[in-house]
Amino acid sequence: MVDTDSGWDGRGGRGSRGTRDTGGTWGMRGARAPDALPDRRVAAPDRGVAAPDSRVAAPDLRAALPGRRVAAPDRRFALPGRRVAAVSLVALAALATGCEPGTATGAPEASPPVRPTQAAAPSPTRTAPVTEDAKPRTAPPPSPSASTTPPAPAPATARPAPEPSTAPPPRVLMRTGSESDRVRELQARLRQIGHFGRNPTGYYGSVTADAVRSFQAKRSLPVTGATDEVTWQRLLAMTRVPKAAELRPPTERPLAAPDERCLKGRVLCISKNSRTLAWMIDGKVVSAMDVRFGSEYTPTREGVFEVFWKSRDHVSTLYDTPMPYALFFSGGQAVHYSADFAANGYGGASHGCVNVRDKKKVAALFDQVRTGDKVVVYW
């Protein structure tokens, strides 16, 4: 509050020093009465609380300044609120000294400035969507459901599954286990084009099935190993009619010199060395054929024997295998046709019998041999 008895005339700069007179006033310019102005740090209004209407609370400055000795209103009685009185005093001091700008009388109070330590939050921009390039690198990756995720490609339209063919499969003419002159022709035709490396036997075994598979695979046919109508017609178109010598070639192996015991009478002369059988009458060869013998664990017996039993459609009771055209000469050992020998050649062995792979020849032999005829097995 300003003391009206201090004698301060309000003139002079802040930098001058004066002396105090006996009347209790400051006589030099620039001196400030200790009680002339309130401490502005204390008198500043609380800007966070709205003050009463300053137009009513502030005193009329034009009436109070003619003599520049203005009596400050009593804080206890001049205004209803102490904060309002402080605002009036600040305005009066600013007009008197002219050092700080003040708010004009009756003007609304200015909004408080933003503190330097608080960064103003940017207002969200609704019209400019944030793109992937504008996102900070520390931001988490967008979720799969975010709008920035590229749309998944539309699944390709699945083609309808082809309907199964209603056409019946081609009829099978020959398969494993078949035995006929047509099988012999099949083997001879396959041999012409390099798929069958043996003489025809007339029996459809594993070797013939493998030869058919090889032919089918090379011609892009279904690889089944069985000879159907399509496979057969394709083979006929690529080959010629086999000659008689191709269908029934002579024995591949040369006959060995006959043993002395084979030169008289009716003899089945069997050589293990040449792996041949010669049907001889009085030293002359009537027919010859390839044969194979038992393994080292079931060897074919050697010596001189005689045929004691003939069985055209015999089946082994020990091994449950067919033994057609069997001519028994020693216990369970016999000369007979072997489908396995016809199919697999010398890759296998018998259980002690003398196997023949040419079924037609052994069938003719069965009809000619009699019970009691001699059998000679030798090296």
Image (cartoon, rainbow, N blue to C red):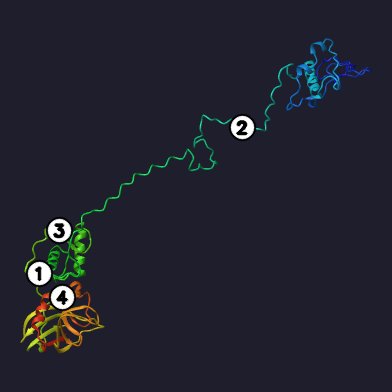
Q: Which residue type does callout 1 highlight? A: Leu
- Mark 3 and mark 1 lie on one chain; the one further toward the N terminus is 3
Contact flag, marks 2 and 3 (Cβ < 8 Å)? no
Seen from the viewer's position, the closer of residues 124 and 11 is 124
Q: In the orientation shown, which residue stands out farthest toward the right?
A: 22
Element assignment for label 4: loop
On residue 247, the disc is 1
Label 2 neighbourhood size at 10 Å, few (<14), some (14-19), many (20+)?
few
Label 1 neighbourhood size at 10 Å, few (<14), some (14-19), many (20+)?
many
Distance in Å between CA atoms under marks 4 and 1: 14 Å
Q: Position of residue 96 (x, y in %)?
A: 80, 16
Name the image quarter holding residue 326. bottom left
Question: Left or right: 271 with respect to 296?
Answer: left
Contact flag, marks 3 and 1 (Cβ < 8 Å)? no
- Mark 2 and mark 3 lie on one chain; the one further toward the N terminus is 2
Nearer the observer: mark 2 or 3; the answer is 3
Seen from the viewer's position, the closer of residues 331 and 274 is 331
Q: Which residue type does callout 3 highlight? A: Arg
Q: In the orientation shown, which residue stands out farthest toward the front?
A: 166
Label 3 neighbourhood size at 10 Å, few (<14), some (14-19), many (20+)?
some
User: Residue placed at 54% from the left, 38% from the top?
Assistant: 136
Which residue is tagged 4? 357
Residue 73 versus residue 232 in the image, above or below: above
Which residue is tagged 3? 234
Q: Is residue 272 visible?
A: no
- Mark 4 and mark 2 lie on one chain; the one further toward the N terminus is 2
Contact flag, marks 3 and 4 (Cβ < 8 Å)? no
Which residue is tagged 2? 121
Element assignment for label 1: helix
Contact flag, marks 4 and 1 (Cβ < 8 Å)? no
- Mark 3 and mark 4 lie on one chain; the one further toward the N terminus is 3
Residue 268 versus residue 4 in the image, above or below: below
